[in-house]
Amino acid sequence: MNKDQVQKYLARIEWKGKWPEHTLNSLKRLMKAQLTHIPYENIDVYDLEQVPDLKETVLFHKIIENHRGGYCFEVNGLFYQLLISLGYPVYPVGIRVMWNKTVFQPALHMGMVVQLNQQKYLCDVGYGGPGPKEPLPLKEQEICTGDKRFQVSRKPNSNTLCRHNQPFPEAGLYRDDGADYLICVMTEDKWRPVMQFTDTPFCETDYETMNFYCAKSPELKFGRVRIINLSTENGSVSMLNHELTIKNNGQTEVYHYDTAESISRILWGKFGILFPADKLKI
């Protein structure tokens, strides 16, 4: 991403002030600006039945120039390129989404780790759920970010867990006996797992297979449900198929829309997405 593209990106998220510095405060501001201006959305996957193209030039045209959003590999992928272009020490990781899951999950989500002043932080602008909306320090602790309380802990590395399920563990295919990071969130007075990952850099090409599977697997929700989410100053605006939910200062309003024309208007009015009604599924 060249300097002109970075400036267009910063304009898209309405960045205020001087060029972002390599500080935790600037990183927090970048994440907040991203989350409140670029929606998480799977319209291409659900309504167009397409596998998103993850090339940087394609993502830049879609998200920055065409004022769209994307799902995790798209919005996290482009935000990752922004951080690289701004000079942040950052690398991508593969994450297992554990929210509302009762069994161990495959790594089908992208996040990134940024290191500032010898401290690593998890950054994720493409979760669309109850994950941290600010850089989360990767050290064992309980911490409040925004209106949520998170717990960061370590547990046996996923490779170690997988090894015990192998028919021939003596083959030595899994040798990493480290520990995964497990992120939990406090809800209804109990800790619930949100995500788990190994602190190992992924290659950008690793996400191609994950992206294809997420877009095309009938077992996953992305091709079955339209999902859109945008953070706001005091809550969020989200859409699940025909249902719009607005959360503001602890209050929740729900609206239902039955026509493609009304959904198209909501996409523009609430999420800033210009998408033709005749291409929407009803």
Image (tube, rainbow, N blue to C red):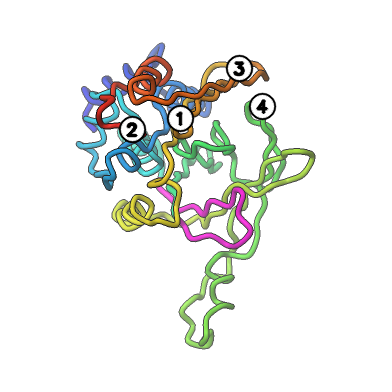
User: Would you name the residue on which mark 1 appears?
Assistant: 242
Residue 71, image x, y percentages? 39, 39
User: Would you name the residue on which mark 3 appears?
Assistant: 248
Q: Amino acid at mark 1?
A: His
Measured in 3D between alpha carbons, the distance from the residue under mark 4 to the one under mark 3, in whole angstroms, is 12 Å
Q: Quadrant of residue 160?
A: bottom right
Which of the two marks, 3 or 2, is nearer to us in this view? 3
Residue 147's disc number? 4
How many neighbours does mark 2 have within 10 angstroms: few (below 14), some (14-19), or many (20 or more)? some
Q: Earlier in the sequence, mark 1 or mark 4?
A: 4
Residue at 59 percent of width and 70 percent of height: 161
Figure check: 106 above or below 116: below
Figure check: 21 above or below 81: above
Residue 261's disc number? none
* Residue 100, magenta (yes or no): yes
Q: Amino acid at mark 4?
A: Asp
Q: Mark 2 falls on what kind of element?
A: helix
Q: Earlier in the sequence, mark 1 or mark 2?
A: 2
In the image, the segment drawn in magenta is: 91-107
Q: Amino acid at mark 2?
A: Leu
Residue 110, image x, y percentages? 43, 47
